[in-house]
Image: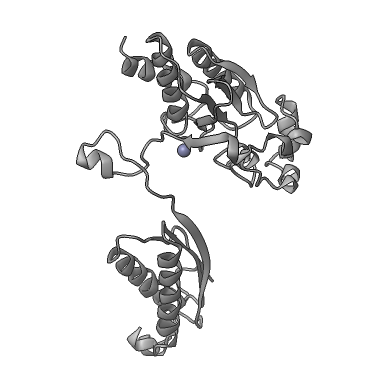
Amino acid sequence: MTFGEIAQSRLHEIAACSQAGDGVTRLPFTPEHRAALDQIRGWMEAAGLQVHMDAAATLVGRCAGPEGSKTLLIGSHQDSVPGGGRYDGIMGIALACLALEKIRREGLAPACSVEVLAFADEEGVRFPTALLGPRVLAGTFDAAALGLADRDGVTLGAALAGFGGDPARLAALRRDPAEVLGYLEVHIEQGPVLERRAAAVGVVTGICGIERNAIRFTGETGHAGTVPMADRRDALVAASRFIAAVSEQAGQTNSIRATVGSISVHPDAVNAIPDRADFPLEVRSVSNEARQGFTDEMRALGNRIAAMPCHSR
Ligand SMILES: [Zn+2]
C-alpha cells in the first residue's frame, strides 16, 4: 500500500469510532474517544513514537531529537462536530504519524524533537467551552471552565478526570515558547476553493478573527389585513434590507465573510406585522482592522435603515 492508501484506510477505520447516525459524531471523554485513542496510539507506535496521554487527555507521541533541540508540535483534534466529516481534525493526526513513519522507514531522523498531539476537545460541542488542549499548551486555559457542565450535568473537570486526565495538573502543561520550534497542523479545507482549483494543498497565511454581534430591529406590530402598507413599521422588512445589504457589501470585499445564520421574529405569527427581529451578525476576517471597519459601517447602515420612513424601506 502507498502512504496515501494507508492514510485512507486508517481514516476510514477510525471513522467508525462514532455514535450511531450519519457522519462522525465523536465527543470528548466518551467510549468513542477512547476507541479512537487506541487506534491513534497504534499509528504513533508504528512511527516509533513514545506515547502518553497528558493531564488534558491529549494523546502525545514524542520522537526525541538531538540533545537540547527544540520541539516541533504537529497536531489536530480527534473530536468531531455532530455528524461531522471523516477528515476533519483527525486527518492532521493521521498524516503527522504517517510522515514520521515514512521518515523512520527511510532510516532518517528529524533534526529536532517532534511531538504529535491528538487534542481531546477542540470543537466545544459537549461543553460550552472549546480548545481545551491547545489552550492548556499555550497557558491560556481558564480553570473556571472546568466547572462548565454538559447537558447531563457532568462537568468538564469530572469528565476529564473520569477519562484519566488530571484537572489539577493542567497549568503544568504550559509549554515554554523558547523550547517550541513551531506548531504545524494539516487540516481539511472546509470550503470549495481548493477543489474548484483542483489544488491538492493550500498554505494557510492567517486565521480569521470572529466577532458576533446581536442585532435587533424594532417596529410596531399590527394586523396583517387592516394596517395599510404605507403605515407599517415592519421590523422584519427592515432586517431583511439590512441582511441583504450586509451580504452585498461583504461580497464587494475579498477580506470579509459576513453571515446571518438565524433569526427570530416577534410575535412570529402568520397574520401579524413583526415588531421585533433579532439575529446574530457574524463577521470574520484575517484582518482585525478590516473586520472592525466593516462592523462600524454595518452599524451605521443599520441605523440608516432603521431611520428610513417605513414606505421607503
Ligand atoms: Zn477541524
Whole-percent x, y for residue 206 in the image? 41, 50
Foreground pick, 248 / 188: 188
Q: What is the number of callouts on the image?
A: 0
Q: Quadrant for residue 28, please give it.
A: top right
Q: Quadrant for residue 86, please give it.
A: top left
Whole-percent x, y for residue 79 in the image? 54, 32
Q: Residue furthest right?
A: 168
Q: Quadrant for residue 153, please give it.
A: top right
Examine the rendered structure and indicate whether residue 300 appears above or below residue 67: below
- Of the 4 image quadrants, the one containing the C terminus is bottom left
Q: Residue furthest left?
A: 197
Identify the residue at horizontal 42%, vertical 74% (top origin).
298
Identify the residue at horizontal 43%, vertical 80% (top origin).
300
Q: Is residue 78 visible?
A: no
Left/right placement of residue 5 relative to residue 32 reads left
Colouring style: one colour
Q: Is residue 120 visible?
A: yes
Examine the rendered structure and indicate whether residue 249 appears above or below residue 3: below
Whole-percent x, y for residue 263 in the image? 48, 63
Whole-percent x, y for residue 188 in the image? 38, 35
Examine the rendered structure and indicate whether residue 99 appears above or below residue 156: above
Left/right placement of residue 295 relative to residue 195 reads right
Examine the rendered structure and indicate whether residue 208 appears above or below residue 272: above
Foreground pick, 245 / 233: 245
Identify the residue at horizontal 65%, vertical 39% (top origin).
136
Foreground pick, 68 / 290: 68
Identify the residue at horizontal 36%, vertical 39% (top origin).
189
- Of the 4 image quadrants, the one containing the N terminus is top left
